[in-house]
Image (tube, coloured by chain):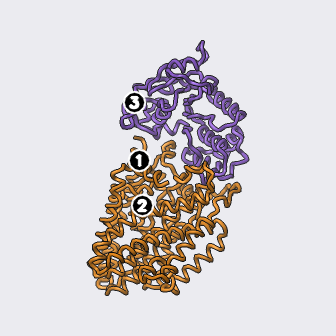
Chain colours: A orange, B purple
C-alpha cells in the first residue's frame, strides 16, 4: 500500500513536486510558529496548539472510514480507494481497513507530521525545549494524530453497529472534555509530553490503544447491505424546491455514509479546537480575542470539508455529456454547499454564546458565510471536483494555502486585536471578509469555464 | 445529408497520437460501427464528436454542427453512452432519469421512464439505489438515458457489456428499430461479432487512422478476416 500510494501521487503530481511537499510544510509550519512566537506566545502553548491541530487533522483523516463504508458496501460503485485494489485477495475487509489506516498514519508521519515538527525546531530550541523533549514531541504528535484518526474511525465503526450508542459515546466524550479537560488530557499522548513518565505513558497511550483496536473491530462494512429502496417522490420534492443539481448534490450528501452529520462533525471538531485554542491564548497572553471573528473565520475555512462532501460523488466528466453545461452544476454545488454548512456554522456560532458575548458572535454570523464563499470560489477554481488532490500536490497546495492565508491572516489578526480596538477590528474583519467573498464569487463564476476547457483537453 | 463528417482529425496526448488524421462520413439512418483494437482511438473519436474533448487538429460536424465550437448545441441533440460508466451511486434509476429529464428539458419524463423501463426490463428496480444494482442493471439504466430524449443521433461505446444473452438480443433489436425509424447510431466496439451482426456500415480503425469502411454484408471473407488484414495482427474470435 505504501508503494502504491507513493507511485499514485508521484504519477499524479510529478515526483519532484510530490517530494517537495514535506519541505513546503516544514517552511510553512516554521513560519507560522515563528510568527506566534513573536507575539509572545510561550513554547508550551505552541506545543499544546500543535497537538490540538494535529488531533483535529487526524479526526478529519479518520473520516475516511465514512468513505470506506460507502466504497466497501458499493463494491462496484464509482467511489474507489487504493485499499480496494487488494479486494480480490483472501483478506478480510476489516483487516484491510485496519492496514489502510496504519498506512495512512505512517504516510502522514513522513509527509506531514515530521516536517511540522522540523519546522517547530528553531522556535522550540530558542524557547528552551531540549533535544530529548523535541524527540518526545515528535512521538506524541504522531500519537495524537493516530488518536484523532482512530477516534474518527471508531466512531464511524460504532455508527455501522448502532446509532444510539454512537450518540451516547459522543455525548460522553464531549461532556468529559468540557467538565474535566485536565483529566482527559492525561489520556492523550499530549499528557505524556507535558509530564513524561512511566505512569503517564501508560495512561497517555491507553485511549490510543483502545481506539486503534476498537475502530477496525467495530467497523462493519456489510451493514445495511440489503437493497436500499427510497421514496420515489423525494427527489421530485427537492427539485421543486430548488434546481436539479442542488437537489442531486443534497441527496448524495445525505445518502452517503455519515449523512449530513459528517458536515456537522467536521465543523464541530474545528469549533471545539478553536474554542480550546482561544482559551489557551487568552490565558497565556494579555490578548482578549474576538470569538465571533475567530469562529466565523475558522468555521468558514472549515467549509473546505463541506466542499469536499458535496463534490465527492461526482465525476465532472459526466456533465460534459449534458446540454446545460458546468455553470449550472457549480451553481447547484454552491447552493448545496451553503445548505449543508450554513445551519451547522450558525449553530456553532450560537453555541459560542456560552463563552463569548452575543454581540461579538454576531460579527461571526456576518464573517462566516463570506469566508465560506471565498473558500468555495478558491476551491472550485483550483481543484474542480477533486479537492482531495490538494494534499501532496506541492504547487497546488502552496497556491491554495497562500490564497487562504491571504484572507485568514488579517482576519485572525483582527480577532486577536479585538480587545484593544473593537470597532476597528470589527470593521476590518467584515471588510476583509466582504472583499474575500467578492473574489470568491468571481472565481466561482470562472471555475466552470476553466474546468470545461481543462476536461476537454 | 451526412449525420457525421470527420476530416483529418488528430488528437495528441503528450507524445502519443491517439488519432492521426481520421477521416470518416456517416450517413443519416445508418447504424455505423467503429471497430478497432484497444487503444486504437475509438473512445477519443466519440469524445471529440460529442464535444467532450477538443482535437489537436482537424474538423468535425455532427448533425451539421461543429462539436468543438458548439459542444452544448451538439449535446442537446444527441445521446451518449460512455464506456465503463455507471449511474450515480446515490440516486435510484428513476431519480437519475428524472435528473436527465431535467437537464434535457424533457416534458413527459414520467411516461418516458415507464416506457424505457419496460423496453429494457428494469421497472422492478426503479426505486433501488444504483449502488445496489448489478452491472447489467446499471448498463440498462445507462442505455435508457441515451435514448430517453429521443435523439436523432446516438453515440454508444460498448453497449452490450455486462448484459446477459437475452438482454443482448433485446438491446440489439432496440438499436435496429431506432435506426429503422431514420435515426443514426454510431457504435464503438472491439467485438467483431457485434459489429458484424448489428451494423450497416463498419469502419476499422487502428493506430488512430481509419483503415477501411465497408458494409459487412458485402464482405466475402467476413468482417473478422478484413479486421485481421487491416489491423495486421492475429485476433481471436470474441
Point out the frontmost of discs 1 and 2. Answer: 1
Q: What residue does disc 1 label?
A: A11
A124 relative position to A150: left or right: left
Q: What residue does disc 2 label?
A: A376
Position of residue A36 relative to residue A84, above or below, is below
- Which badge, 1 or 2, comes first in the chain's sequence? 1
> Residue A261, how many percent across, how many down?
56, 68
Q: Are marks 3 and 2 on the same chain?
A: no
Chain of the residue where label 1 is placed in the rendered structure: A
Point out the frontmost of discs 1 and 3. Answer: 1
- Of residues A221 and A135, the one drawn nearer to the viewer in this rendering: A135
| Residue at 48%, 81% in the rendered image | A198
Q: Is residue A36 visible?
A: yes
| Residue at 51%, 27% in the rendered image | B3
> Residue A450, how many percent across, how many down?
38, 48
> Residue A208, how many percent across, how many down?
52, 73
- Of residues B166 and A97, the one drawn nearer to the viewer in this rendering: A97
- Of residues B144 and A2, the one drawn nearer to the viewer in this rendering: A2
User: Residue A35, located in which quarter of the rendered image?
Assistant: bottom left
Disc 3 packing (10 Å; few <14; some 14–19; many ≥20): many
> Residue A155, how many percent across, how many down?
58, 70
Q: Are marks 1 and 3 on the same chain?
A: no
Position of residue B73 relative to residue A316, above or below, is above
| Residue at 51%, 56% in the rendered image | A312
Q: How far, Cα to Cα, is label 3 from label 2? A: 37 Å
Amino acid at each position: 500500500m505504501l508503494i502504491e500510494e507513493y507511485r499514485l501521487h508521484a504519477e499524479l503530481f510529478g515526483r519532484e513536486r510530490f517530494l517537495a511537499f514535506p519541505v513546503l510544510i516544514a517552511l510553512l509550519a516554521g513560519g507560522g510558529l515563528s510568527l506566534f512566537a513573536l507575539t509572545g506566545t510561550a513554547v508550551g502553548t505552541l506545543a499544546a496548539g500543535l497537538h490540538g491541530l494535529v488531533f483535529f487533522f487526524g479526526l478529519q483523516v479518520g473520516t475516511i472510514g465514512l468513505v470506506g463504508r460507502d466504497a466497501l458496501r458499493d463494491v462496484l460503485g464509482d467511489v474507489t480507494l487504493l485499499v480496494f485494489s487488494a479486494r480480490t485477495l483472501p483478506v478480510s475487509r476489516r483487516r484491510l481497513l485496519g492496514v489502510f489506516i496504519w498506512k495512512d498514519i505512517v504516510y502522514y508521519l513522513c509527509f506531514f507530521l515530521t516536517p511540522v515538527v522540523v519546522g517547530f525546531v528553531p522556535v522550540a530550541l530558542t524557547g528552551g525545549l531540549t533535544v530529548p523533549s523535541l524527540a518526545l514531541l515528535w512521538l506524541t504528535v504522531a500519537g495524537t494524530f493516530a488518536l484523532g484518526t482512530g477516534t474518527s474511525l471508531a466512531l464511524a465503526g460504532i455508527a455501522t453497529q448502532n446509532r444510539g450508542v454512537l450518540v451516547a459515546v459522543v455525548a460522553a466524550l464531549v461532556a468529559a472534555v468540557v467538565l474535566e479537560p485536565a483529566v482527559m488530557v492525561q489520556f492523550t499522548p499530549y499528557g505524556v509530553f507535558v509530564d513524561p513518565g512511566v505512569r503517564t505513558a501508560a495512561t497517555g497511550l491507553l485511549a490510543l490503544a483502545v481506539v486503534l483496536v476498537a475502530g477496525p473491530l467495530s467497523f462493519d462494512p456489510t451493514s445495511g447491505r440489503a437493497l436500499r429502496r427510497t421514496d420515489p417522490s423525494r427527489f421530485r420534492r427537492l427539485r421543486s424546491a430548488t434546481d436539479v443539481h442542488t437537489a442531486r448534490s443534497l441527496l448524495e450528501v445525505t445518502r452517503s455514509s455519515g449523512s449530513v452529520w459528517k458536515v456537522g462533525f467536521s465543523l464541530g471538531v474545528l469549533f471545539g479546537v478553536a474554542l480550546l485554542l482561544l482559551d489557551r491564548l487568552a490565558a497565556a497572553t494579555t490578548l482578549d480575542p474576538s470569538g465571533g471573528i475567530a469562529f466565523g473565520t475558522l468555521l468558514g475555512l472549515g467549509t473546505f470539508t463541506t466542499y469536499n462532501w458535496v463534490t465527492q460523488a461526482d465525476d465532472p466528466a459526466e456533465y460534459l455529456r449534458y446540454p446545460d453545461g458546468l455553470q449550472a452544476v457549480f451553481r447547484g454545488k454552491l447552493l448545496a454547499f451553503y445548505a449543508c454548512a450554513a445551519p451547522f456554522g450558525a449553530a456553532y456560532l450560537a453555541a459560542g454564546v456560552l463563552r463569548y458575548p452575543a454581540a461579538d458572535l454576531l460579527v461571526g454570523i456576518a464573517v462566516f458565510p463570506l469566508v465560506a464563499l471565498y473558500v468555495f470560489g478558491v476551491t472550485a477554481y483550483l481543484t474542480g471536483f477533486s479537492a482531495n488532490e490538494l494534499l501532496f500536490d506541492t504547487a497546488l497546495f502552496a497556491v491554495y494555502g497562500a490564497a487562504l492565508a491571504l484572507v485568514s491572516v488579517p482576519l485572525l489578526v483582527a480577532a486577536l486585536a479585538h480587545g484593544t480596538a473593537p470597532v476597528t477590528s470589527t470593521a476590518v474583519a467584515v471588510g476583509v471578509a466582504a472583499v474575500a467573498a467578492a473574489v470568491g464569487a468571481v472565481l466561482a463564476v470562472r471555475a466552470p469555464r476553466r474546468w470545461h476547457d481543462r476536461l476537454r483537453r | 445529408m451526412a449525420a457525421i463528417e470527420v476530416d483529418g482529425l488528430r488528437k495528441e496526448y503528450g507524445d502519443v497520437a491517439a488519432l492521426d488524421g481520421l477521416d470518416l462520413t456517416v450517413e443519416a439512418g445508418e447504424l455505423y460501427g467503429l471497430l478497432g483494437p484497444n487503444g486504437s482511438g475509438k473512445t477519443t473519436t466519440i469524445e471529440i464528436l460529442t464535444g467532450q474533448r477538443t482535437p489537436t487538429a482537424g474538423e468535425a460536424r455532427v448533425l451539421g454542427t461543429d462539436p468543438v465550437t458548439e459542444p452544448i448545441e451538439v449535446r442537446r441533440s444527441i445521446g451518449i453512452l460512455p464506456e465503463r460508466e455507471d449511474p450515480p451511486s446515490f440516486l435510484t434509476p428513476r431519480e437519475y432519469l428524472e435528473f436527465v429529464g431535467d437537464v434535457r428539458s424533457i416534458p413527459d419524463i414520467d411516461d418516458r421512464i415507464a416506457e424505457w423501463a419496460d423496453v429494457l426490463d428494469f421497472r422492478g428496480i426503479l426505486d433501488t439505489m444504483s449502488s445496489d444494482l448489478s452491472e447489467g442493471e446499471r448498463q440498462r439504466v445507462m442505455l435508457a438515458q441515451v435514448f430517453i430524449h429521443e435523439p436523432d443521433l446516438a453515440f454508444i461505446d460498448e453497449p452490450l457489456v455486462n448484459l446477459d444473452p437475452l438482454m443482448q438480443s433485446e438491446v440489439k433489436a432496440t438499436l435496429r428499430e431506432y435506426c429503422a425509424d431514420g435515426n443514426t447510431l454510431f457504435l464503438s466496439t472491439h467485438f467483431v461479432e457485434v459489429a458484424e451482426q448489428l451494423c450497416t456500415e463498419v469502419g476499422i480503425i487502428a493506430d488512430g487512422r481509419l483503415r477501411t469502411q465497408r458494409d459487412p454484408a458485402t464482405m466475402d471473407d467476413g468482417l473478422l478476416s478484413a479486421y485481421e488484414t487491416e489491423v495486421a495482427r492475429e485476433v481471436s474470435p470474441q
